[in-house]
Image: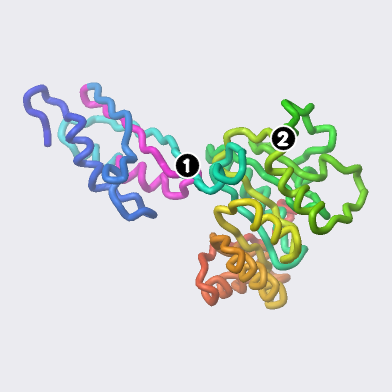
């Protein structure tokens, strides 16, 4: 593989070495998946870019180590610099049904209130943004919009409209939109049917969203009108179910999961929230195994989260 004529490796050599490095989740090599770009060689100094399918890839560290080791094994290579970029795959149904620049819509739901669904939603959105993903969060809980408070925003945080559309304020790198910006504090919303349907759709289409990789939708609790409206009018890329570990909560969470399936929303998995001494732990994981869906993780009760 070593180019004896000029004493340096070639781009072909590097690609051959990286063809032995697997993408851990896609189970194919980086070269076959066309994930290696911008190879540059300066004597013994080699650099290249790995283009991920999401900037929030949890296994990028593993790919960086294995890629570095593969190229360092080539004769003449003294140093390897690996950069990362991302090209997030989009849900093609969104562009066909909604005129918004969003690649993926992820709904976070629960079968009942009080399980920390909104807490999970905001932390998921902020974590994606911290990993480099362009992220927004939409508070679809029309009756109890808490996302502005959780993101440290108020009604005064809403910028002036632009071209007839609401402009989402930015917090922690996340674009935020909620009915909480539009109704006086403490005022109750009593809507059903067409009014609810129209309000939820407008929060998608009458907002000047930026180019987003992920729009996290914090769903209202239960499986009522709002859930039905969202699934029928918006192409949801996938749904996440949040539950606490105890059996009563899990029964309701299972109803939410079944509702998603009936509405043909792909299930991304279950998150077990508020685990620990008070509610126990393991119930969400066992439910995921029983229902044959991924278990995404467990969040323990912690005063810092409160």
The answer to if 283 sits in the magenta stretch is no
Residue under numbered circle 1: 88
Give 288 or 101, whichever is nearer the viewer. Answer: 101
Measuring 59% from the left and 58% from the top, which residue is drawn there? 239
* Vertical position of residue 294 compared to residue 34: above or below: below
* Vertical position of residue 86 compared to residue 278: above or below: above
Q: Is residue 237 visible?
A: yes
Distance Cα–Cα, label 2 vs label 1: 22 Å
Do the residues bearing badges 2 and 1 touch, measured as CB atoms within 8 Å?
no
Residue furthest out toward the left = 5
Magenta stretch? 43-67
Measuring 75% from the left and 61% from the top, which residue is drawn there? 225
Q: Position of residue 59 (x, y in %)?
A: 42, 49
Measuring 65% from the left and 38% from the top, which residue is drawn there? 174
Indicate how the structure is coloured in the image: rainbow
Image-quadrant location for residue 222: bottom right
Q: Position of residue 205 (x, y in %)?
A: 68, 40
Residue under numbered circle 2: 168
Measuring 74% from the left and 55% from the top, which residue is drawn there? 303
* Number of numbered discs on residues: 2
């Amino acid at each position: 593989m070593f180019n004896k004529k000029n004493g340096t490796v070639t781009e072909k050599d590097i690609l051959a070495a990286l063809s032995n490095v697997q993408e851990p989740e896609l189970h194919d090599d980086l070269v076959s998946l066309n994930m290696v770009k911008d190879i540059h060689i300066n004597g013994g100094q080699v650099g290249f870019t790995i283009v991920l399918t999401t900037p929030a890839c949890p296994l990028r560290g593993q790919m960086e180590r294995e890629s570095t080791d593969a190229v360092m094994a080539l004769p003449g290579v003294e140093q390897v610099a690996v950069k990362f970029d991302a090209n997030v795959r989009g849900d093609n149904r969104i562009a066909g049904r909604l005129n918004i620049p969003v690649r993926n819509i992820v709904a976070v739901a629960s079968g009942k209130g009080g399980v920390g669904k909104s807490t999970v939603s905001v932390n998921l959105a902020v974590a994606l943004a911290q990993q480099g993903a362009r992220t927004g969060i939409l508070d679809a809980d029309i009756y109890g919009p808490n996302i502005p408070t959780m993101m440290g925003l108020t009604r005064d945080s809403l910028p002036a409209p632009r071209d007839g559309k609401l402009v989402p304020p930015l917090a922690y790198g996340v674009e935020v939109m909620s009915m909480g910006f539009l109704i006086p504090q403490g005022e109750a919303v009593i809507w059903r049917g067409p009014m609810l349907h129209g309000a939820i759709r407008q929060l998608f289409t009458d907002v000047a969203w930026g180019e987003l990789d992920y729009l996290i939708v914090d769903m209202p609790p239960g499986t009522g009108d709002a859930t039905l409206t969202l699934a029928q009018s918006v192409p949801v890329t996938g749904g996440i179910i949040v539950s606490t570990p105890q059996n009563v909560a899990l029964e309701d969470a299972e109803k939410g999961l079944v509702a998603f399936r009936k509405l043909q929303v792909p299930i991304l998995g279950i998150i077990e929230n508020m685990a620990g001494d008070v509610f126990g732990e393991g119930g969400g994981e066992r439910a995921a195994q029983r229902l044959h869906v991924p278990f995404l993780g467990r969040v323990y009760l912690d005063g810092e989260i409160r």
